[in-house]
Amino acid sequence: MTTELLEKEKTKTELRVDPLISFIVPVYKTSKDLLKRCLMSLVDQDYENIEVIVVFDGIDQELIKVVTPFLVDNKRFKIIEIEHKGACAARNAGFKESSGEIVSFFNSDYIAKPGMTRTWVDTLLDNPEYGFAYGGYEYSTNQRNAYMSKEFNEYDLTQANYIDCGFPLWRKNVVEWDENCKSLQDWDFWIRVVKKGVKGFHMEHDPFYVAQLPQPGGLSFDSHNNWVERVKYIKEKNGIPMSPLIVTSIGAYNHAREISKILKADCQDLSTILKPNNYKALYLIGFYFRPDGGRNFHPDIIEHFSKPGIKKIVHFVGADIYWLRKFKFDELGYISAVLNQETDHILCETEMAKDELLSMGIKSEIVPIPPYTDLSVMPMPEKFSVAIFLSDLSDFDKYCKEETLSLVRAMPMIQFNAYGDGGKNVSYPNFKNYGNLDRKEWEKFVRDNSCYLRIVRHDTRPLATDEFLVAGRDVITNIPGKGVEFIDTSGDSKKLEFDKFQTGLNDIYWSKTKKAIIHKILELRERPYDKALKERISSELSKELDKKKYIEKIYELAEIPTSLNGERI
């Protein structure tokens, strides 16, 4: 940063007025020690402009004695007493008495960590396009287990809550707490805040406060014991459809989320998928077994849904097949037998995947998953460029990150554009990293690139490959398929024909393979654009990947009508 910019930032900071933040603390049957520790943690913050409004949900003289010293020594504290009506009524009463530009509904068993308030206020001031900020909190256990929350996604919030009630929001964005909501109250609150068009900023920070584990008689116990009823109340009240089909994935949750949108199904992750439910069918995207013997949640999910009348569908979509190779013969036999017996339908996306699964004793049916987007052949960009995918999150080097980057270095005359979570620190003159893309950004990314390069060690049918082909782009890959420029990276011509991934990307032959890929990229750069061919490939793939056919197939396997409440899905 230049000296001029540093000075501007310094001036901006010096001129910024610290807004008042109101901590509204509802109190009901809290222990004296916890309440005292909660209030002391707020007093000890390195941020002066606060007010703490303690709302007694029912008169409790013993607990009032705990708060009284704070009133004497600190004018920033205020006590309100109301007739016992529940936490939501207490929060509403506290908000009416508050004055802060920023508000936090801070539970009386929370203990704020040092620097919490300053970080919250600075985050909101530095990101004015966001209406609230949230992050993680820690449980008061010896293991110091923490819930770190996740990136803001409005759709995810309609499926399950991931934002705790204690986090701050601007006063103008506060909605009235629903006093008839018996539990899951913060979920209902944040849904209604977000429905106003408000976005949340996810603070990727250490936990901000310590929370006590759920106690008998508390709200968490109520939601756990009445989960189906409480979820139904929240969803019906907020106009969120309830589907008889649930989609989930442990290894590819983003994929599952988009698939659930196509199917108009519910979607949940590990935080709620093992809760009680009334679903008629489970659709599990990916099915991973851990060869190291560690905890594997996929069998847990199958077991959880092993109730009469619930159909269970497993769709192998990528490296899940790869990991099956790591088991011993007798272990694999047991896995395949249990999988065949405990699920109603096993799906995959290609003939190659079907044959590979069959070689392991797993019978499957081919059902390709359609792209989320509705692309068609688009004009080519003026300048030739190659799109690539880079990831640092794969459980093995599935996407050949270093090999792909070596191609970028070897071809300075070609512009490479990357997407994904990997390569954030990579810097080459002919390289640009776009990071993770939302749907609109993705469509533009496809339109702005001439070619897609995808070299993997193991995969089935990547959605991105289909999307680039449907958009009329060239695709270079080592996965055989319609319309692609296939590069055999195994280096072993004697391999069994059905097993294209017997050796995956053979490192011994990488030099030869690299030359072949470079030659292919240069060839495509010079090749005249054949619009008729591209439109034919696009048309054929679009028919094969028809969303309507896919929806009808999944609902047929789930034995759920595709017409619910008189409305076709």
Image: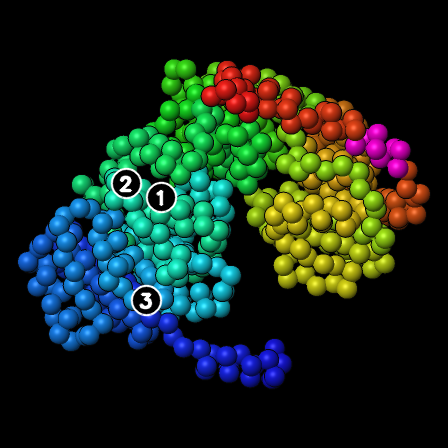
Q: Which residue is drawn at the image coordinates 74% and 59% (left, top)?
A: 431
Query: Real-space Cα distance between discs 3 and 1?
Result: 22 Å
Q: Which residue is drawn at the image coordinates 45% and 24% (left, top)?
A: 244
Indicate whether 391 appears above or below 21.
Answer: above
* Numbered disc 1: secondary structure: helix
Horizontal relation, residue 461 to residue 528: left or right? left
Q: In the image, is residue 78 part of the stretch drawn in magenta?
A: no
Q: Which residue is drawn at the image coordinates 80% and 56% (left, top)?
A: 415
Q: Is residue 506 visible?
A: no
Q: State the colouring used for the structure image.
A: rainbow
Q: Residue furthest left?
A: 61
- For label 2, count other residues whose C-alpha is less than 10 Å away and answer few (under 14), some (14-19) or many (20+): some
Horizontal relation, residue 537 to residue 527: left or right? left
Residue labelled with disc 3:
100
Which mark is first along the chain, 1 or 2?
A: 2
Looking at the picture, tell me which residue is in the foreground, 323 or 227.
Answer: 227
Residue labelled with disc 2:
181
Residue 458 figure quarter? top right
Looking at the picture, tell me which residue is in the foreground, 245 or 237.
Answer: 237
Magenta stretch in the rendered image: 531-538
* Amino acid marked by disc 2: Cys
Q: Looking at the image, do the residues carrying marks 2 and 1 touch, with CB atoms under 8 Å apart?
A: yes
* Numbered disc 3: secondary structure: loop
Query: Real-space Cα distance between discs 2 and 1?
Result: 8 Å
Query: Real-space Cα distance between discs 2 and 3?
Result: 25 Å
Residue labelled with disc 1:
188
Q: Main secondary structure of the magenta part?
A: helix
Horizontal relation, residue 525 to residue 349: left or right? right
Looking at the picture, tell me which residue is in the foreground, 247 or 424.
Answer: 247
Q: Quadrant of the C terminus?
A: top right
Which mark is first along the chain, 1 or 3?
A: 3
